[in-house]
Image (tube, rainbow, N blue to C red):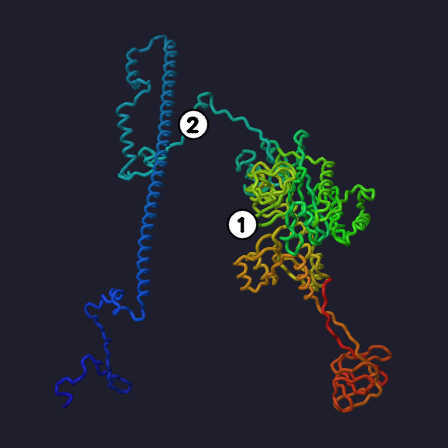
Amino acid sequence: MSDSDGKKTLGVRGGPRSGQVKQSFSHGRTKNVVVETKRKRVVVPKPGSGKSGSAAGGDPSRRPAGISDAEMERRLKALQAAKARESEDAKIRADEEKRRADDRARRRAEIEAKEREEREREERAAAKAAAEEEERQRKAAEDAARKEAEAKSKAAPAGGGRQDPAREPDAASARPAPTKSGVPTPRKQDRDQDRDSRKNRGGDGRRSGKLTLNKALSHGEGGRHRSLASMKRKQERARQKAMGGNEPREKVIRDVQLPEAIVVSELANRMAERVADVVKALMQNGMMVTQNQSIDADTAELIIEEFGHRVQRVSDADVEDVIHSIEDNSEDLEARPPVITVMGHVDHGKTSLLDAIRNAKVVSGEAGGITQHIGAYQVRTDGGDLLTFLDTPGHAAFTSMRARGAQVTDIVVLVVAADDAVMPQTVEAINHAKAAKVPMIVAINKCDKPDANPDKVRTDLLQHEVIVEGLSGDVQDVEVSAITGKGLDQLLEAIALQAEVLELNANPKRAASGAVIEAQLDVGRGPVATVLVQNGTLRQGDIFVVGEQYGKVRALINDKGDRVEEAGPSVPVEVLGLNGTPEAGDVLNVVDTEAQAREIAEFREQQAKDRRAAAGAATTLEQMLAKAKADEDVVELPIVVKADVQGSSEAIVQAMEKIGNDEVRVRVLHSGVGAITESDIGLAEASGAPVIGFNVRANASARSTANQKGVEIRYYSVIYDLVDDVKAAASGLLSAEIRERFIGYAEIKEVFKVSGVGKVAGCLVTEGVARRSAGVRLLRDNVVIHEGTLKTLKRFKDEVAEVQSGQECGMAFENYEDVRAGDVIEIFEREEVERTLD
């Protein structure tokens, strides 16, 4: 069978379709290629197969493989629950949409009602203004008619009565006929002319069929109407003109308060003059200034006098005049509780003694068993007397905190341990009490210990001019024990007696003033200040200024953690509501208005900035260069400090400043109060400094940033550990000390010349040992003439590492050959010794 007989070739139905493609190449070459086309198989589902999925749940034979009855039941339940949730969500959405629609409709109705009321009010005002205008015009017309009639009546006798009667009807006809109200009406042709002119003015540009707000408010006329104030001004001008013309107003002479510098526009405002007139006067005096430029007080005084006003020179510091002390009347004074500060050396039992008085356990909650914050408490004695106690830290780093406690106190209780006697911080506490000029009571604590010696304490105090009553002095002393409670009643009696002698009084009816004992930045409450009220009564809602911060008392919390409405004299409270964290030791004053408080705080902040700028500006270029040259060899350890309260931050910074010497010092880049934030991490990363947190932690974002940037964060709760670790880190920056250790001497007996080596000294080790790796010095007549290293050390012909005392060897020096018989070789080793800061 040939290919051209016209019959189709046999093949499998639905198989690949084949065909030929002719490919052309260069030089007339061609090629036939057989191409097969495969068709994709399309599977058509059988009738009724679509129900298999729905029947799978009920018919086990059609269920998917591996699905049990329990699993299928769980799936069906989940499906039903999902459908129920969808219906509930749809219902909730519909209710929410309905509520929103009701709210929108209510708001729309309220807005429309307001607009309607506003429109009616505008219409009434416009109607009233039109009525007044019409009444004024009517009165003016009546006055004009009356004046004209009077003039004619006067003119009639003057003419001798010879008036032509024929002219009277003409005059009457020329005058429009008056109406009932007396106002003449225009003629008909005048009305027609007015109507035609209005028609021509309107043209075809009217916006027909469109009601705008302006059109509705102006009774369909699109133009603006004069305001009621404008109408009143116009009436006033007309009245003055009718009474005899415009007379110039009498100039008001004002007292103008003039600070050290003032802006031109503010000067014009205080004089109640036009700014353009003030600028013109300044230009006439040769000063080309604009209204936004400042001028000095002398120039402003000339301008004020030129305008005829009086000058009152004031200073920027006058803003604080509102908080100056006021003398209290003796009848307003009332007795107040005494403020007692407990001071002494660290670990002498100050807090334990206060706990015994208060029946509390503060010591057990303190890190390391030492006090690191200043605390304020109130105690009521058995006799009903109220006492306010301040507990100060005894650690050396908290000097400023102890000084603040002594400044605000009435009585100082000096706690001295009977087994430890007078210590450095005891002496410091004595000096603080003397500087504050407050009486002192000595409490000799730990008298229950076997090795207690109270007499030694009394004699040691004599060296510091503290003479107790037992030694014919005037300082009370009480032997107490915080553990057994011995002598506590006698101590309270001594305090009450001393307070009675002092006659402590205050006026609770005046504006409050007090001192900030401690300040902190609380995460939930914001800036919090512990304030001891010294005079007046601090109430919730009072506006106050404290240092460079101000605020309004949002809440007052007493020493027991309860909220109170007010705090009287000698009452310690936590104050919430500040705009920033104040410095510990700042004075709190209550003022009348928030504007005054803000102005005083801004003035104090500007003063602080000026002081810092002046301190920097006072440094000359030579001093800066000299300081840079002096600090060239000093290695700095930068750190960032964050603490829980202001006093701790201040104490840590002071402790860091004391660490270091001429080669190494610690530099505090930033110190603050509150949690460690991302900005602290950024500052530490830029300076390569660790971040130190004292009783605070880093927030989540700060921790992740520190991990990414490799910044070290170290947490501390005891100031001892913090100071020791920083001191150790600073010691690591010190360069190691190089020390020389002599290990032997050798005497040169003979000098040989060896080819390829040079001069070799034949030596006898007279003392110690000679090592190949050690350093050597060549001594001639006990004078060092060379210092270097050995090139070779041989014993006989062998190279050796060391030669012992009494043995002979050969030595050759590195790059030196001037050796002679009789010279002495000193052999030594160098070793590095790590240094530490004292």
**In this picture, residue 436 sits left or right of residue 279:** right
Image quarter in which the C terminus is found: bottom right
Q: Residue at x 74, y 85 (%)?
A: 801
Front-lying residue, 14 or 723: 723
* Residue 76 position in % (x across, y down): 30, 61
| Disc on res. 524 | 1
Instruction: Nearest to the eye among marks 2 and 1: give it.
Output: 1
Q: Residue at x 31, y 53 (%)?
A: 87
In this view of the protein, can residue 290 be seen by the observer?
Answer: no
Q: Residue at x 59, y 34 (%)?
A: 256
Front-lying residue, 430 or 730: 430
Mark 2 burial class by Cα count in 10 Å: few <14, some 14-19, many 20+:
few
Amino acid type, label 2: Lys
| 459 lies above or below 144 | below
Front-lying residue, 290 or 561: 561
Report how far apart the C-alphas of labels 2 and 1 lie in the structure.
57 Å
Amino acid type, label 1: Gly
* Residue 717 position in % (x across, y down): 63, 57
**In this picture, residue 253 sits left or right of residue 451:** left
Q: Secondary structure at mark 2?
A: helix
Q: Secondary structure at mark 1?
A: loop
In this view of the protein, can residue 186 be seen by the observer?
Answer: yes
**In this picture, residue 305 sits left or right of residue 419:** left
Residue at the disc numbered 2: 232
CB within 8 Å, label 2 to label 1: no
| 738 lies above or below 508 | below
> Residue 108 sits in which quadrant?
top left
* Residue 99 position in % (x across, y down): 34, 45
| Disc on res. 353 | none
